[in-house]
Image: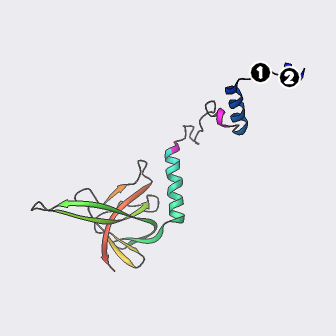
Amino acid sequence: MADATLPAFTKSQKAKRKFRSAFPCAWHWRKAEPFACESGNRMNLLQNGLQWLSEKQSKHVSSEALYCRDENTYVVNAVLGRTRYEIVDENGFKIAGHAIDFLIAASDLPLEPKVGDKILCENIVHEVIDLGGDGCWSWCDPHGIRRRIHTEVYRL
């Protein structure tokens, strides 16, 4: 008699019930309201994710460096990287090489990098260079969280 009072479920309905009981919040995601920032706007998940990643990189995979321009010196946390480039000289020959990049949070460096600035990292002096007319730096992300600064070894 107890079996007659229970509703009969199809195989797919049983699978849905099993999934919903295992992951109770998974089927609510469509109904959930988007999070709001303090200003009341919707939260930009990509920007917040990039900010979080930048903070983790600065904490766990960066090296402390000194950024020097004239008499001003800034202590920054920099993640090291590399950019490969090709330059065609006046005779038409391709010159290939790579630049050592310093990925520095924009909040750590209040000024815009320019050619000739020096970065001291691990007792090696690097000079900021222009990569074939593309500039000496570029943004790592579309939100302006971290800069990629191109350098070459200036002095060991």
Q: In the shown orientation, is residue 133 left or right of residue 28?
A: left
Q: Is residue 51 above or below residue 152?
A: above
Residue 81 occupies quadrant: bottom left
How busy is the neighbourhood of tag 2: few (under 14 within 10 Å), some, or many (20 plus)?
A: few
Q: Which residue, given by chain and number where applicable, does mark 1 sit on?
A: 8
Mark 1–mark 2 Cα distance, whole angstroms, equals 9 Å
Q: Is residue 131 left or right of residue 37?
A: left
Q: Is residue 88 left or right of residue 14?
A: left
Residue 145: percent from the left, percent from the top?
Answer: 45, 53
Q: Is residue 23 above or below residue 4?
A: below
Give the label on residue 3, or none. Answer: 2
Structural crowding at the residue carrying mark 1, measured as other residues with C-alpha within 10 Å and reported as few (<14), some (14–19) or many (≥20): few
| Residue depicted at 47% across the width and 70% down the height | 63
Identified at 26% across, 62% down, the residue is: 130
Out of 92 and 144, give the one closest to the viewer: 92
Amino acid type at circle 1 is Ala
What percent of the width, then of the height, locates residue 92? 11, 60
Could you tell me residue 142's position as x and y percent? Answer: 41, 47
Residue 41 inside the magenta-drawn segment: yes
Q: Residue 125 appears in which quarter of the rendering?
A: bottom left
Give yes or no for residue 128 being in the magenta stretch. no
Helix, strand or loop at mark 1: loop
Report the quarter where the C terminus lies. bottom left
* Residue numbers of the magenta segment: 23-45
Picture coordinates of residue 122, whole percent (x, y): 42, 77
The amino acid marked with disc number 2 is Asp
- Could you tell me how many numbered marks the image carries? 2
Q: Earlier in the sequence, mark 1 or mark 2?
A: 2
